[in-house]
Image: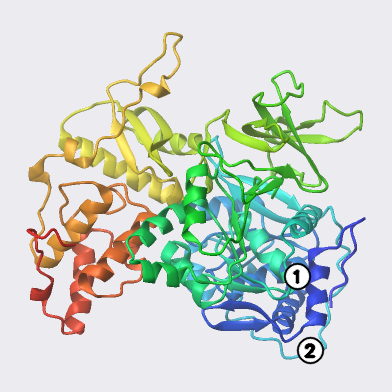
């Protein structure tokens, strides 16, 4: 067993995990699609990996990359890296090769852990790659021991990359003490125990995954690790809650927005059955929660789980939380984010760094145990965002500038009211608009560009790119340019940074004092308004016609052709779940959500449906569209 130091008044997460290994070694620690690991097995396999890493020279402050699909492997990998004394750098295998290569280059990582089938995505010397699924079989020698690591609370735990305003992602350095303080601070609020079953839904490249992994493992609870498909499908998550007896569900407000839409399409009996579960804790995090959505979520449940709104950043993990009282009856606006955790402080200051009173709006600053080292290889940005605390005489005490605008409510809870920069959140993921703009400017035809987040429908924020080309010619050329811009972004940025619409303008609107007039940027037109009908290849078969009707209903676009791409028409992963649900009802076939990503055009997806129908010997005549009755 690794011997970890107690950091001042707080126990390390690895000590807490190993305490659970001693207390209940045969309890289930993690369940991934029926693959189970007990606490003893998870600890043994993580120890085995840690020993392998130490034999390769891994010590504290060495960065070890981990690029793996959602699986038991990635959990073993993270624990093994930490037990070896090193810090992990998560690399999402869905990212473009160029982005993965950029992170590998900047971190100068000493070793990379991955899976055999992902090697082709990674540009890295083979001698420095460890294949966790083939080179690290299950531990056979129980008496293998780890070498002393001399790790301290101020050593790095991990580096996580977020969108950067300069056009390249930035690496946030998180120390072990930050993780220790955060996990135990939030435990005091939630009171998890060994009877809880926690649904893990977050990408391991995002900071919420830290809470969803180490909070349950530190308290002896069981983790249900949702598959990649399930994390994109709100109904699948609700089914997991019901079938796996989940007690803690930790997710985004936008997931609930689409889950409620899907629930409304069910009959009452189906809906009540799906929501009949032992769920006792419902956590919202990652994006602002509206009062209207909260009200709808409450109305959906027969019982009343505790509902808690969490707030934090990648740089701070978590700062404060708000347990929503049963009598909370705010009708409009955002739900407060509450009060700081123990060992954390929050300040709302004006531009002169003076504290503000009740309901006065200023920037939110954070201090205390949540602050880490800042940004990897970027001392300038670190000094801009992590500043000396002007409110104390304690030398060295710092504040983190969150960029969030906030105010105190009369009960001293904190309410977030907006941003003072160009950072937004799309479905819970932080996006620096400047990084998208910088990438679009790489195209030789782009003269100027602005990217914004629009919320033209409630709880449905989307990215829109406004482009001024050097030459604005025919509609056909406009379509070609938009396609080229989409391909450029796909090659360099993650999917969540893809605009749902591109708007071509002669000039950008300007205010009287010469700045871009963001309020005057037009609402994006649907493709119906800008493309010629002759450019649309109409559906040819009954299956294509029926599928086009489904897309029309969900996307609000009348003209849909067989070559149209669902995502280029404004679709995204949460809307994709509605398409899959409608296909199930209309064709009586089960398609995995991945099908729409692999076959995103109407024609390609229709072919997949027809293949299944043929295999099931289902006559196509039975799915003819009944336009008179308006069936789907």
Q: Is residue 131 visible?
A: no
Determine whether the residue tagged by mark 2 lies in a helix, strand or loop: loop
Residue 231: x and y in percent read 48, 64
Residue 482: x and y in percent read 28, 40
Instruction: Indicate the colouring scheme.
Output: rainbow
* Mark 2 to mark 1 CA distance (whole Å): 24 Å
Q: Is residue 474 left or right of residue 151?
A: left
Above-or-below relation of 16 to 356: below
Residue drawn at (55%, 60%) of the image? 203
Circle 2 residue: 142
Residue 158: x and y in percent read 70, 56
Q: 302 or 507, which lies in front?
A: 302
Q: Is residue 210 visible?
A: yes
User: Are discs 2 and 1 less than 8 Å apart at CB?
Assistant: no
Q: 231 or 306, which lies in front?
A: 306
Residue drawn at (73%, 51%) of the image? 174
Displayed quadrant of residue 319: top right
Callout 1: 10 Å neighbours few (<14), some, many (20+)?
many
Q: Is residue 111 left or right of residue 123?
A: right
Judged by depth in the image, the label closer to the viewer, 2 or 1, is 1
Residue 30: x and y in percent read 63, 76
Q: 114 or 313, which lies in front?
A: 313
Circle 1 residue: 219
Callout 2: 10 Å neighbours few (<14), some, many (20+)?
few
> Which image quarter holds the N terminus?
bottom right
Determine whether the residue tagged by mark 1 lies in a helix, strand or loop: helix
Residue at the farthest top position: 512
């Amino acid at each position: 067993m690794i011997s970890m130091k107690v950091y001042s008044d707080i126990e390390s997460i690895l000590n807490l995990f190993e305490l659970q290994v001693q207390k209940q070694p045969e309890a289930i620690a993690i369940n991934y699609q029926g693959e189970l690991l007990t606490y003893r097995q998870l600890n043994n396999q993580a120890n085995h990996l840690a020993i392998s890493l130490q034999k390769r020279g891994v010590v504290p402050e060495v960065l070890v990359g981990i690029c793996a699909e959602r699986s038991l492997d990635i959990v073993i990998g993270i624990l093994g890296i930490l037990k070896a004394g090193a810090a992990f750098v998560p690399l999402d295998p869905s990212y473009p090769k160029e982005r993965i290569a950029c992170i590998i280059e900047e971190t100068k990582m000493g070793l990379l852990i991955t899976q055999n089938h992902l090697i082709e995505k990674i540009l890295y010397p083979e001698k420095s790659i460890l294949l966790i699924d083939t080179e690290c079989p299950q531990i056979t020698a129980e008496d293998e021991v780890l070498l002393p690591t001399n790790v301290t609370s101020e050593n790095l735990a991990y580096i996580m990359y977020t969108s950067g305003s300069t056009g390249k992602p930035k690496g946030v350095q998180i120390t072990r003490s930050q993780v220790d303080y955060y996990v135990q601070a939030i435990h005091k609020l939630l009171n998890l125990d060994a009877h809880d079953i926690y649904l893990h839904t977050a990408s391991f490249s995002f900071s919420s995954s830290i809470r969803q992994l180490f909070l349950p493992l530190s308290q002896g609870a069981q983790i249900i690790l949702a598959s990649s498909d399930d994390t994109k499908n709100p109904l699948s998550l609700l089914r997991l809650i019901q079938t796996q007896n989940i007690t803690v569900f930790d997710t985004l407000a936008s997931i609930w927005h689409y889950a409620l839409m899907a629930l409304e399409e069910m009959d009452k009996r189906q809906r009540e059955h799906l929501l009949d579960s032992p769920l006792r804790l419902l956590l919202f995090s990652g994006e602002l929660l509206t009062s209207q959505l909260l009200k709808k979520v409450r109305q959906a449940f027969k019982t009343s789980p505790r509902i808690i709104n969490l707030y934090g950043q990648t740089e701070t993990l978590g700062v404060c939380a708000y347990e929503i009282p049963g009598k909370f009856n705010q009708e409009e606006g955002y739900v407060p984010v509450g009060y700081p955790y123990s060992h954390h402080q929050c300040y709302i200051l004006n531009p002169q760094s003076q504290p503000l009173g009740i309901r006065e709006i200023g920037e939110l600053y954070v201090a205390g145990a949540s602050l880490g080292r800042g940004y990897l290889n970027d001392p300038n940005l670190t000094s801009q965002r992590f500043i000396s605390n002007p409110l104390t005489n304690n030398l060295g005490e710092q504040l983190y500038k969150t960029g969030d605008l906030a105010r105190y409510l009369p009960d001293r809870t904190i309410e977030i009211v907006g941003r003072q920069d160009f950072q937004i959140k799309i479905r819970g993921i932080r996006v620096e608009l400047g990084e998208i703009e910088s990438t679009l400017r790489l195209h030789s035809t782009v003269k100027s560009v602005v990217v914004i987040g629009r919320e033209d429908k409630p709880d449905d924020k989307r990215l829109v790119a406004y482009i001024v080309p050097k030459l604005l010619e025919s509609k056909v050329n406009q379509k070609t340019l938009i396609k080229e811009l989409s391909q450029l972004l796909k090659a360099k940025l993650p999917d969540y940074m893809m605009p749902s619409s591109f708007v071509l303008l002669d000039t950008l609107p300007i205010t009287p004092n010469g700045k871009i007039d963001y309020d005057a940027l037009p609402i994006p037109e649907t493709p119906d308004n800008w493309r010629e009908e002759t450019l649309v290849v109409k559906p040819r078969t009954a299956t294509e016609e029926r599928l086009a009707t489904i897309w029309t209903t969900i996307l609000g676009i009348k003209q849909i052709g067989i070559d149209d791409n669902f995502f280029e028409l404004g679709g995204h992963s949460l809307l994709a779940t509605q398409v899959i649900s409608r296909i199930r009802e209309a064709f009586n076939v089960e398609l995995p959500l991945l099908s729409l990503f692999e076959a995103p055009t109407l024609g390609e997806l229709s072919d997949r449906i027809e293949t299944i129908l043929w295999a099931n010997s289902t006559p196509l005549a039975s799915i003819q569209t009944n336009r008179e009755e308006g069936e789907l």
